[in-house]
Image: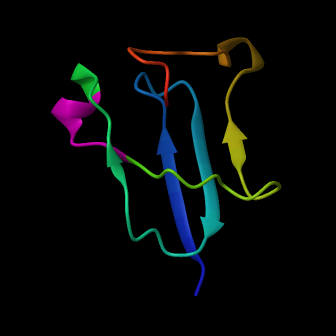
Amino acid sequence: MPQHYHGSCHCGAIKFDFEGEEITSGLRCSCSVCSRKGAMMNPKAIPPGKLNIDADENDIGLYQFGYAVA
């Protein structure tokens, strides 16, 4: 059964949601903000056409941290 997921960037300027299969595994991000929040990420890509982004176009950009894996 599809699940509804939602999230945002750290500052909250970019919000997203999608429906997909139940997420049963994840990875812990090692940055200080995610560590404090207990945030998780999933290594599987969100299927094309399923991701809805709610953000001002000027707020969207590329952010990389540490090893630039996420």
Q: Is residue 69 left or right of residue 52?
A: left
Q: How many marks?
A: 0
Residue 11: give x, y in percent of width and height. 42, 21
Instruction: Give the residue drawn at x 63%, y 16%.
Output: 62
Is residue 37 on the magenta stretch? yes
Instruction: Write down the region rendered in magenta.
Output: 34-40
**Can you tell which quarter of the image residue 37 is in?**
top left
Instruction: Give the residue drawn at x 67%, y 15%.
Output: 61
Closest to the observer: 43 or 3? 43
Q: Is residue 26 left or right of residue 33?
A: right
Residue 42: give x, y in percent of width and height. 46, 52
Closest to the observer: 66 or 49? 66
Q: Is residue 30 left or right of residue 26?
A: left
**Can you tell which quarter of the image residue 58 is in?**
top right
Q: Is residue 44 left or right of residue 10?
A: right
Q: Residue lying farthest left?
A: 36
Answer above or below: position of 50 versus 55.
Answer: below
Residue 50: give x, y in percent of width and height. 75, 59
Instruction: Give the residue drawn at x 26%, y 24%.
Output: 33
Looking at the rendered image, the quarter that the N terminus falls into is bottom right
Instruction: Give the residue drawn at x 37%, y 56%.
Output: 26
**How did the renderer colour the structure?**
rainbow
**Can you tell which quarter of the image residue 4 is in?**
bottom right
Residue 18: give x, y in percent of width and height. 64, 59
Q: Residue lying farthest right?
A: 49
